[in-house]
Image (cartoon, rainbow, N blue to C red):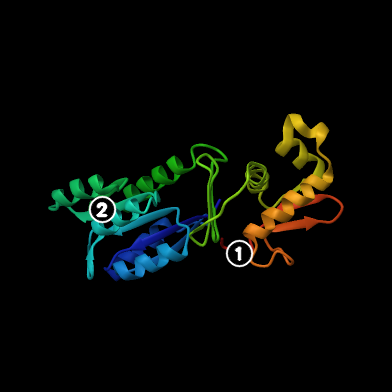
Amino acid sequence: MKYQILITEDDEKLNHGIRLALKGEDYFFFQCRTLAEARQVIRQQQLSLILLDVNLPDGSGIDLVRELRRDQNQTPIILITVNSMELDVVAGLGAGANDYITKPFSLMVLRARVAVQLRDRSQTPGSAYCAGPFQFDFHHMRFYKDGHPIELSKTEQKLLQVLCDNQGATVSRSRLIDLVWQEETQYVDEHALTVAVKRLRNKLEDDPSAPVYIKTIYSIGYSWRLRQEGW
């Protein structure tokens, strides 16, 4: 699974240092130095984690935490603050931040704190999916593309989850029917699957007639894929 991490820190050297410390094949980074830049990224991307400096040139990171929680955005947030600003820590956690780290800090400690938040986010296997333009919360039945909510039927939710759980692999039509309809398979034929896939494509694809996410694997089944490397 790819994790999209936003680093918002106005100290350019520290900003790049954090990226280098966390660099890994499973991480994709967005780097900002102001609240305005951060808000733009948050509107456009489905993030896995936000690293947020409290004191930024155009305002307080704590205000951004409040905004996100007020908008029901539950992306994990780790605040970056200075040792002498204990009140910022209290205010930040009270606003909804998940953790904090104080300057100067060990990059080893930072890596550990980040790992904890990402692990907590994915501790329920298959319950959440965040990649590319998509954010799917199967447990709470919330689905977004480019930040916009998508309404899915129960069947569409089950179908999508099976495909996401097997990202990059081909799932046969018979296996999909077994997993999606389960005990009702005796009443379901392949036409029902075709219809469900078509409806799901209509809701997720930019151009349902030329799907790039839900690919048909001729004579076998379907595969969930992302269209850009690095997502």
Quadrant (top left/top right/bottom left/bottom right) for the C terminus: bottom right
Q: Position of residue 124 (x, y in %)?
A: 51, 37
The image quadrant of residue 159 is top right
Give the SS element for disc 2: loop
Residue at horizontal 40 percent and vertical 45 percent from the top? 117
Horizontal arrangement in the rendering, residue 131 relative to residue 81 (left or right): right
Residue at mark 2: 105
The image quadrant of residue 161 is top right
User: Is residue 224 visible to the viewer in this orientation of the structure?
Assistant: no
Quote the CA–CA distance across marks 1 and 2. 32 Å
Disc 1 + disc 2, Cβ < 8 Å:
no
Query: Which amino acid is tagged 1?
Result: Glu
Sort mark 2 into few (<14), some (14-19) or many (20+) by Cα contacts within 10 Å.
few
Viewer-nearest of discs 1 and 2: 1
Horizontal arrangement in the rendering, residue 220 relative to residue 23 (left or right): right
Residue at horizontal 43 percent and vertical 58 percent from the top? 5
Q: How many marks?
A: 2
Q: Position of residue 46 (x, y in %)?
A: 48, 58
Looking at this rendering, what residue extends furthest in the right direction?
219
Give the SS element for disc 1: loop
Residue at horizontal 23 percent and vertical 70 percent from the top? 58
Residue at horizontal 76 percent and vertical 32 percent from the top? 184
Query: Which amino acid is tagged 2?
Result: Phe
Horizontal arrangement in the rendering, residue 5 relative to residue 141 (left or right): left
Residue at mark 1: 229
Horizontal arrangement in the rendering, residue 143 relative to residue 14 (left or right): right
Numbered mark located on residue 164 in the image:
none
Q: Position of residue 167 (x, y in %)?
A: 66, 50
Q: Is residue 188 above or below residue 212?
A: above
Q: Nearer the viewer, residue 139 or 4?
A: 139
User: Is residue 186 visible to the viewer in this orientation of the structure?
Assistant: yes
Answer with mark 1 or mark 2, whichever residue precedes in sequence: 2
